[in-house]
């Protein structure tokens, strides 16, 4: 075992989602020696499988004041510290003719009580503000919703943690704990790539595994009952709307349409699933039907807009009652000190909450960690901008590293890179003409940007690259770029066989999302993709051992 | 399923399946690495522009608007239209004095024609070319088309107008700026040809430039104004006088048929089918047995036909080439269909000159290697470009036909007694 492996940490954080990365950042900023471990890739769980909605909190105002208040506070903080991840689109809560307009009055009142600036406006003004909204609406309320990119947000937290000395291990699964009597002293890790088992030691282990935290707690011998509620979403081919559209009624299926980066997302459904199904997120035909039926009510043009894919995530709610839908449950943060709760020292679980409150969850967990470790350092994550967001935004919200005068001469991919990485995009090098070449044409990702992601953002496979850059997330779903990106990746990892396997799992993962919505252009595209990769490249002919890594 | 039973998206750019054939056929992509190509500039870029206009790439100015991408596209994506519309909507560059001068073909023609000998002489002077190159950024490598001493319409009024009504059938000729100010002979040839088959040639009550150069140079208000004036006269001719509109320029024809609707958003569907190229009009008359052509003896020429981009888009080169092939003694050579590079005003601009000549090179080489006496084409700017770049004479098929027919015998066989 190398010396590094024996290194003793103050804190080990389990889970590479927003909460885990945020906790690692907070711990590192407060001077704790921190290790972040993740079994697959950052954002591989619920963080990468949601709406990407920067909630104003309005959605929870009527049913859950506490969550609503937390949301609006964090909303304002994220606009400051994560401006390269936030798109300030604004939001609308619209009342359809079939909805009760009475709900609106109570809704606005509850928003104001929670500190949310909810402003009822004339439906005609709402239509002017967002022409994609159903023109039959009878009521509209403006709220400070927005869009947030969970991939960028999480990676920015990781980069920040690393800058403050944290170590990071992806593709390392916690398979058990090191313990001394009633104290957790470290974690047993399995390297997902080669199966090697090692241990890392720390004074304190923080379980930030989201829904998978249920299982991690079990490994530690304590019980945290999670409530897996599956939510399915559809991704449309382009931005149908530029303002978030919510339905002004009691939260139900498919009532939020979010403009996320280049696309629009309708969601979600909600259905209870058994815990053993949380890694099998298939979207059913019924779910697609519900999303379309309800979605077209708030934006009729969805009926004839191309759908790129369907996906589903699991809400990591902490079970507290028998509500079968999982919606009336509080999305409040749960921070457990297992020493006081279960008599197990050195172990904290941070769970519940949501993407919007990841920073607050991290703050609570780190406050508790500091208290337990006897450190008295204040949290600064609400004040210090994330890496990428240090510069002021201009040009309609894009954080730009270049002087304004030069922007007009930038190509679309260079502008897109600036938008994706904020001030970090200064690290993208366009040294040669080849670096300027575009790999992913739909999402405008250049060779230079991929090289930067490989060098700096923990990218070992194509799916990692997708999450860091949007490679393969566009209209063609990797049809053109997967092969090109594999060529760049193989230059970095020098392993053709692994990359070929990786290419195959990347294409399969793309296909999985396209399958539930495979009609019209998407079906033609899928067929074309299969000709390219199976027919021309013979990818299906190459007998390779199944790559289990992150090919969910 | 219920909600997406029409499996084709109503958003035309979403019909792109990213096959990239358009980029293979794009003449600009082949020579200019700064141009993202039709796929990226068109449907791919459109998604980003819908997100934020900020993502507009000024490199879209390199698009020739040749529409070869649209011809190549198997998914019926209006790639060229998407790019032109994006340029109009998002580009932050406003037209320069040079752009206005190049685009205002009718205004410049009106100003130059009365002084044609002087203007033509001056435009040929090296120091003048140098000044235009450095001040106006009009490339000094470019040879300017000469201006005619007399406009087509003033010739027509003096020599043709009074006799036209006597012909049993009538058609309206959209002459365009080139025939009007630079080369009235083509208009005269058309009158000769049409008269020979028994058609009188009328002019529109009011004709303005078709607007193609104004659209290309982002002078949209001006283009709209001209288009509406043209359409008003066209409607009168088509609906009231029951006449069809014929033209000798493939680009003018294409612009009035397709660009008015797709780029300017002006509904022209009530008259679109009545606007056509003279060769198509004539071919259909011959094909349906309504008229016949009789040719002179002793016509011996080897002629290569070049397909202009907008002719390719119209799909009509078959009419021009079929007519040419009817001429006994005409040794016909079909050139590969590829862009000559000039694209109207595009090739005159200093920043495009090198690309313009690069695009046309394969065509020029093919012409020089085919040992022909003459090149035939339906587009005036292709004519300038090929003449300048190969030294070969270029003529419109209408002029070649007018030269090849025996006028009296043709009149006789068609029982024309005027």
Image: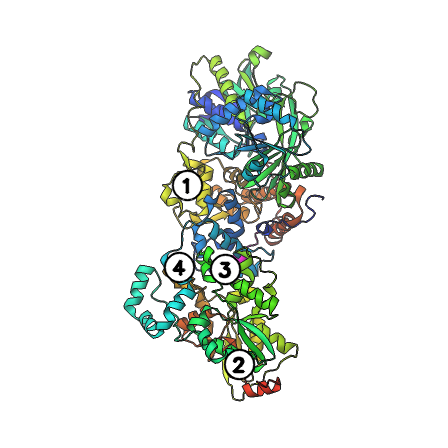
Q: Distance of mark 1 from mark 2, alpha carbons?
A: 73 Å
| Mark drawn on residue B26 | 3
Q: Chain of mark 3?
A: B
Circle on res. A428: 1
Q: Residue furthest left?
A: B127
- For marks 1 and 2, give the one nearer the viewer: 2
Which segment is the magenta one?
A: B17-27
Does B104 appear above or below A316? Answer: below
Q: Which badge, 2 or 3, is on the more N-terminal residue? A: 3
Residue A123 image offset from top left, x and y in percent: 59, 35
Tell me the residue that label 2 is attached to.
B163
Disc 4: CA contacts within 10 A as few (<14), some (14-19) or many (>=20): some
Give the chain of mark 4.
Answer: B
Q: Residue at x 38, y 62 (%)?
A: B101
Discs 2, 3 touching: Cβ within 8 Å: no
Q: Secondary structure at mark 4?
A: helix
**Residue B217 sits above or below residue A509 on the image:** below
Which label sits on residue B100? 4
Q: Helix or strand or loop: what does disc 1 sit on?
A: loop
Q: Chain of mark 2?
A: B
Q: Residues within 10 Å of mark 1 (few under 14, many from 20)?
A: many
Crowding near the residue tagged with mark 3, few <14, some 14–19, many ≥20 C-alpha atoms within 10 Å: many
Q: Nearer the viewer, residue A260 or A437?
A: A260
Contact flag, marks 1 and 3 (Cβ < 8 Å): no
Q: CA distance from mark 2 to mark 3?
A: 47 Å
Do the numbered discs 3 and 4 sit on residues whose CB atoms are within 8 Å? no
């Amino acid at each position: 075992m190398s010396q590094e492996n024996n290194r003793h940490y103050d804190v080990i954080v389990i889970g590479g989602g927003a909460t885990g990365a945020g906790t690692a950042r907070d711990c590192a900023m407060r001077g704790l020696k921190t290790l972040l471990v993740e079994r697959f890739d950052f954002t591989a769980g619920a963080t990468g499988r949601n709406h990407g909605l920067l909630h104003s909190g309005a959605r929870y105002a009527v049913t859950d004041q506490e969550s609503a208040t937390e949301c609006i506070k964090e909303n304002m903080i994220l606009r400051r510290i994560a401006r390269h991840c936030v798109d300030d689109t604004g939001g609308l809560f619209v009342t359809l003719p079939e909805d009760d307009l009475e709900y609106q009055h109570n809704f606005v009142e509850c928003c104001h009580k929670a500190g949310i600036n909810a402003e009822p406006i004339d439906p005609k003004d709402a239509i002017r503000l967002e022409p994609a909204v159903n023109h039959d609406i009878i009521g509209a309320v403006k709220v400070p919703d927005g869009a947030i990119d969970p991939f960028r947000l999480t990676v920015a937290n990781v980069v920040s943690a690393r800058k403050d000395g944290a170590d990071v291990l992806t593709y390392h699964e916690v398979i058990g704990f090191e313990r001394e009597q009633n104290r957790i002293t470290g974690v047993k890790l399995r390297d997902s790539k080669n199966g090697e088992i090692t241990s890392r030691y720390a004074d304190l282990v923080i379980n930030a595994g989201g829904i998978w935290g249920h299982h991690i707690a079990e490994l530690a011998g304590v019980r945290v009952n999670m409530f897996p509620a599956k939510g399915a979403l559809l991704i449309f081919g382009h931005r149908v709307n530029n303002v978030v559209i919510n339905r002004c009624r009691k939260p139900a299926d498919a009532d939020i349409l979010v403009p996320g980066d280049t696309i629009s997302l309708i969601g979600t459904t909600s259905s209870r699933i058994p815990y053993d199904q949380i890694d099998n997120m298939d979207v059913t035909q019924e779910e697609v039907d519900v999303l379309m039926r309800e979605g077209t009510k708030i934006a009729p043009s969805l009926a004839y807009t191309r759908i790129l894919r369907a996906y589903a995530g699991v809400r990591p709610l902490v079970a507290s009652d028998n509500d079968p839908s999982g919606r009336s449950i509080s999305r409040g943060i749960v921070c457990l000190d297992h020493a006081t709760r279960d008599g197990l020292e050195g172990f904290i679980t941070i769970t519940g909450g949501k993407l919007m409150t990841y920073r607050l969850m991290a703050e609570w967990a780190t406050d508790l960690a500091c208290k337990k470790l006897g450190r008295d350092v204040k949290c600064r994550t609400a004040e210090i901008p994330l890496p990428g967001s240090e510069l002021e935004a201009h040009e309609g919200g894009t954080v730009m590293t270049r002087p304004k005068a030069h922007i007009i001469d930038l190509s679309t991919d260079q502008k897109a890179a600036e938008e994706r990485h904020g001030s970090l995009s200064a690290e993208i090098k366009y040294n040669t003409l080849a670096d300027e070449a575009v790999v992913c044409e739909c999402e405008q990702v250049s060779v230079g940007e991929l090289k930067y992601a490989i060098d700096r953002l923990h990218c070992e496979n194509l799916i990692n690259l997708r999450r860091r850059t949007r490679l393969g997330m566009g209209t063609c779903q990797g049809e053109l770029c997967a092969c090109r990106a594999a060529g760049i990746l193989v230059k970095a990892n020098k392993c053709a066989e692994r990359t070929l396997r990786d290419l195959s799992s990347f294409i399969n993962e793309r296909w999985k999302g396209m399958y539930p919505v495979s009609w019209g252009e998407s079906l033609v595209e899928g067929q074309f993709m299969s000709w390219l990769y199976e027919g021309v490249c013979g990818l299906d002919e190459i007998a390779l051992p199944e790559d289990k890594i992150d090919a969910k | 399923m219920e909600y997406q039973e029409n499996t084709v998206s109503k958003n035309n750019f979403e019909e792109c399946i990213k096959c990239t054939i358009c980029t293979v056929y794009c003449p600009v992509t082949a020579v200019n690495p700064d141009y993202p190509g039709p796929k990226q500039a068109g449907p791919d870029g459109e998604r980003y522009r819908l997100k934020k206009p900020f993502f507009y790439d000024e490199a879209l100015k390199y698009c020739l608007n040749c529409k070869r991408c649209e011809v190549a596209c198997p998914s019926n994506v209006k790639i060229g239209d998407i790019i032109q519309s994006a340029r109009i909507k998002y580009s932050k560059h406003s037209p320069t004095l040079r752009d206005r001068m190049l685009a205002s073909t009718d205004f410049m023609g009106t100003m130059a024609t009365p002084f044609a000998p002087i203007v033509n002489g001056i435009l040929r002077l090296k120091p003048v070319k140098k000044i235009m190159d450095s001040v106006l950024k009009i490339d000094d490598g470019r040879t300017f088309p000469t201006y005619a001493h007399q406009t087509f319409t003033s010739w027509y009024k003096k020599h043709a107008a009074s006799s036209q009504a006597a012909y049993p059938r009538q058609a309206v000729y959209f002459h365009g700026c080139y025939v009007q100010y630079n080369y009235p002979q083509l208009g005269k040839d058309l009158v000769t040809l049409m008269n020979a088959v028994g058609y009188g040639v009328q002019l529109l009550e009011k004709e303005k430039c078709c607007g193609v150069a104004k659209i290309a140079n982002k002078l949209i208000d001006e283009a709209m104004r001209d288009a509406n004036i043209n359409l008003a006269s066209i409607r009168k001719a088509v609906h009231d006088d029951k006449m069809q509109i014929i033209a000798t320029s493939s680009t003018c024809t294409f612009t009035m048929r397709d660009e008015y609707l797709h780029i300017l958003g002006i509904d022209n569907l009530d008259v679109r089918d009545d606007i056509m190229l003279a060769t198509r009009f004539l071919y259909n008359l011959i094909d349906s047995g309504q008229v016949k052509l009789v040719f002179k003896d002793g016509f011996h020429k080897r002629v290569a036909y070049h397909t202009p981009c907008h002719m390719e888009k119209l799909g009509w080169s078959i009419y021009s080439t079929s007519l040419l092939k009817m001429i006994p003694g005409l040794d016909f050579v079909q050139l590969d269909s590829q862009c000559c590079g000039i694209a109207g005003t595009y090739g005159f601009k200093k920043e495009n000159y090198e690309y313009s000549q690069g695009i046309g090179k394969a065509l020029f080489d093919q012409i020089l290697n085919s040992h022909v006496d003459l090149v035939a084409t339906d587009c005036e700017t292709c004519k300038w470009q090929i003449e300048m770049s190969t030294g070969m004479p270029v003529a419109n098929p209408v002029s070649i036909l007018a030269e090849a027919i025996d006028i009296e015998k043709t009149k006789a066989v068609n029982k024309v007694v005027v």
